[in-house]
């Protein structure tokens, strides 16, 4: 049997990453994906500062792309920390076309101050323009679900799963949402 050549192998994604977090008074070692899912749960519980803090810890894993930065910015906007919201976005998209950072910032603030239709329209545009960012699909799903548009939210979460790598943090969270909405249907 021939050894696979380097050109025959596909990278499966970033190397496994772990971090230590305090849960219920105990320090635990969790995977990046588990920590990301926990931070998303905190966001859903409206514990915005706790979620933002955990996403900030996840920003050190730059091989995962801008997902933690985007999620922290969303949490900061949800906590009405509008001045802080732009910082993780500026860091994530530094040196690139800064319009995505600005567009996300505006969409997040619009959503959290009640200009939801504008925010949804802007996020849908970003989802279509930036297929390489599954986090945008996850957030658009959250935003649609918050507005009672569960069927459209499910479509966004399905899209997030398809756009993320298998077992990726965004795919894990989106899968959990789809399973939950199907159980409650």
Image: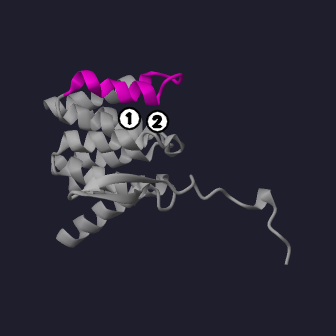
Q: Is residue 67 left or right of residue 8?
A: left
Q: Locate the N terminus and report the quarter of the image it occupies.
A: bottom right
Residue 125 is marked as: 1
Position in image of residue 99 (x %, y %)? 43, 22
Q: Residue furthest right?
A: 2
What segment carries the magenta color? Answer: 81-100
**Cβ–Cβ under 8 Å for marks 2 and 1:** yes
The residue shown at (21%, 28%) is 110
- The kind of secondary structure element at disc 1 is helix
Q: Is residue 157 left or right of residue 95?
A: left
3D distance between C-alphas at marks 2 and 1 = 6 Å
- Image: 100 above or below 20: above
**From this viewpoint, is residue 102 visible?**
yes
Main SS of residues in magenta: helix
Determine the image quadrant of residue 87: top left
- The kind of secondary structure element at disc 2 is helix
- Image: 55 above or below 113: below
Q: What colouring does the structure picture have? A: one colour
Residue 129 is marked as: 2
Q: Locate the C terminus and report the quarter of the image it occupies.
A: bottom left
Q: Is residue 17 left or right of residue 148?
A: right
The residue shown at (52%, 57%) is 16
Position in image of residue 170 (x %, y %)? 40, 53
Position in image of residue 28 (x %, y %)? 34, 59
Residue 160 part of the magenta-drawn span:
no
């Amino acid at each position: 049997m021939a050894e696979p050549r380097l050109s025959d192998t596909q990278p499966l994604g970033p190397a496994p990453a772990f971090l230590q977090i305090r849960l219920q008074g105990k320090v635990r070692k969790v995977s990046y994906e588990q920590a990301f899912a926990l931070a998303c749960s905190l966001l859903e519980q409206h514990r915005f500062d706790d979620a933002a803090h955990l996403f900030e810890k996840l920003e050190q894993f730059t091989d995962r792309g801008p997902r933690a930065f985007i999620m922290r910015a969303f949490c900061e906007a949800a906590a009405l920390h509008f001045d802080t919201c732009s910082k993780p976005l500026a860091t994530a998209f530094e040196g690139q076309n800064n319009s995505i950072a600005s567009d996300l910032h505006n969409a997040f603030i619009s959503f959290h101050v009640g200009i939801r239709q504008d925010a949804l329209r802007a996020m849908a545009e970003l989802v279509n323009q930036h297929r390489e960012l599954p986090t945008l699909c996850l957030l658009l799903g959250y935003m649609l679900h918050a507005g009672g548009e569960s069927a459209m939210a499910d479509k966004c979460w399905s899209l997030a799963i398809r756009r993320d790598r298998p077992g990726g943090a965004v795919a894990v969270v989106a899968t959990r949402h789809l399973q939950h909405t199907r159980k409650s249907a």
